[in-house]
Image: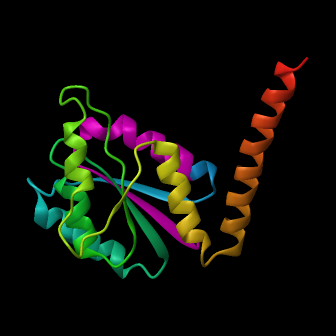
Amino acid sequence: MSASLVVIIMGSKADASHSQKIADAVQQLGLEVVQRIGSAHKTPLHVLNMLTEFEADPRAKVYITVAGRSNALSGFVDGAVSAPVIACPPPAEAFGGADLYSSLRMPSGIAPAVVLDPSNAALLAAKILGLADTQMRQRVMAFQQQQARKVIDDDASQNQ
């Protein structure tokens, strides 16, 4: 059993490709990931039952929610769990970005983080879990060093 878990909950199957980008990035950072589907609007009891199961698991965890339009899922999940929640809504051209407001504006006492890039949502989850896991913190630092080396190598190749 892994020391920690990232739970991705998408609002519908339409969010699967965005969710898979997050899952791939989570796995590259060495974390276990589970992907599920549940809607705060259409299946609230299903989501609550799912969360009850995950909350009974003693492992450290971070939830990443993937829902667009009216993103009730992120606030709903955040209000039902004690672990951190990261909202990573899929991009939508149809609303000119206005759909993001439903991820940004939450009632008091509801505080999911909002990260728009799938790989950055995975990185934030790893950083949070790294607070209590030295090996995860080392993987995050190695990833950041790799990113820095790439920039330095790109710069060097420009000056040749």
Q: Residue at 22% x, 63% y: name it.
A: 75
Q: Is residue 2 visible?
A: no
Above or below, 134 relative to 105: below
Quadrant housing residue 81: bottom left
| Residue 88 falls within the magenta-colored stretch | no
Residue that lies at the very extreme toward the left in this rendered image: 42
Quadrant housing residue 34: bottom left
Residue that lies at the very extreme toward the top in this rendered image: 160
Q: Nearer the viewer, residue 112 or 17?
A: 112
Quadrant housing residue 154: top right
Percent across and percent down for residue 123 are 56, 54
Q: Quadrant of the N terminus?
A: bottom right
Q: How many marks?
A: 0
Q: Is residue 149 visible?
A: yes
- Residue range of the region highlighted in magenta in the rendering: 1-26
Q: Residue at 34% x, 79% y: name it.
A: 82
Percent across and percent down for residue 22 are 46, 46
The colour scheme used here is rainbow
Percent across and percent down for residue 78 are 27, 69
Q: Nearer the viewer, residue 78 or 100?
A: 100
| Residue 12 falls within the magenta-colored stretch | yes
Left or right placement of residue 73 versus residue 135 in this view: left
Left or right placement of residue 69 versus residue 111 in this view: left
Residue that lies at the very extreme toward the front in this rendered image: 159
Q: Quadrant of the C terminus?
A: top right
Q: Residue at 74% x, 65% y: name it.
A: 138
Percent across and percent down for residue 30 are 63, 57
Q: Nearer the viewer, residue 103 or 30?
A: 103
Left or right placement of residue 139 versus residue 149 in this view: left
